[in-house]
Image (cartoon, rainbow, N blue to C red):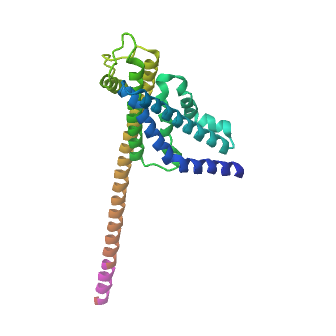
Amino acid sequence: MQFLDVSDRQVTQWERRTSAPLLGAAALFLVVYAWPILQPDLPSAARRGCSIASWAIWFLFALDLVVRVILSERRWAFLRRNWLDVVTLAAPMLRPLRALRIVMALNVLSRRGQAFARGRDVSYVLVAVAVVGLVAALAVLDAERLAPGANITSIGDALWWVATTITTVGYGDQFPVTYAGRLVGLGLMVTGIALLGVITAALASWFVEKVAEAAQSAEQRTESEVLDLASEVAALRQELRQLLRERDRQD
């Protein structure tokens, strides 16, 4: 059992050391992924450089996962616990889903082993959803732009579609017509539901905490008032005893 703990500590130490480089790689990937999509007439040399950088970053994430698997003694349990990393490694096989590789970097924050405050948790979720939404907009535009009958043909259309989908509004004026685009939409729907759940849970927890704090404060005030009243009663009793003793002496 102690050996397993040592192995877990090795994985945690590795994740802490690689958090910053992986986040930087994720940011770079977003740039090299978005550039050819936002600029379709990009020169072939620049497009080729973006492709090479994208694959290099994918290899970096794959190498990170392999190292963590090797350092972990309970490897099957580790793979089950980090199934999202395994799935996103298969993203290059599906061209419109290449951007899912950046989802791996969003897990880096949770690998640091720090206990986040509730406010930070909500902020982290909001930032993660914003990044996923931007990547989804790029992915759906990449999949839909040249498809027959497509109505998502610009980044503005893609961002509007993402906003209506992730908030579960769904106006229906913009929608994907390709299977890849619909798969991106499915992921956005799940993300939107998760976002609403996290925000609702955070608000409910905040209200419960405020009510508990108010109740505790009222209880403390009541206890303090009772103690003060008891002290005053004790002082009055002491004064009454003194008065009774003085009267007895006079009598």
Which residue is rendered at x = 45% and y = 36% of the image? 29
Counting from the top left corner in percent of width and height, residue 152 is at 34, 18
Magenta stretch: residue 208 in it? Answer: no
Q: What segment carries the magenta color?
A: 239-249
> Residue at 43% of width from left, 26% of height from top?
44
Give residue 210's position: percent from left, percent from top.
35, 48
Q: Quadrant of residue 160?
A: top left
Instruction: Determine if residue 107 is in view.
Output: yes
Residue 125 percent coordinates (x, y)? 41, 39
Residue 204 visible at all:
no
Residue 168 in the image, given as x and y percentages of width and height: 36, 24
Question: Looking at this rendering, what residue extends furthest in the bottom direction?
Answer: 250
Main secondary-structure element of the magenta-colored stretch: helix
Q: With 70 as the anchor, is 162 left or right in this view?
A: left
Question: On the picture, is 107 further left or further right than 63?
Answer: left
Foreground pick, 231 / 70? 70
Q: Is residue 38 left or right of residue 180?
A: left
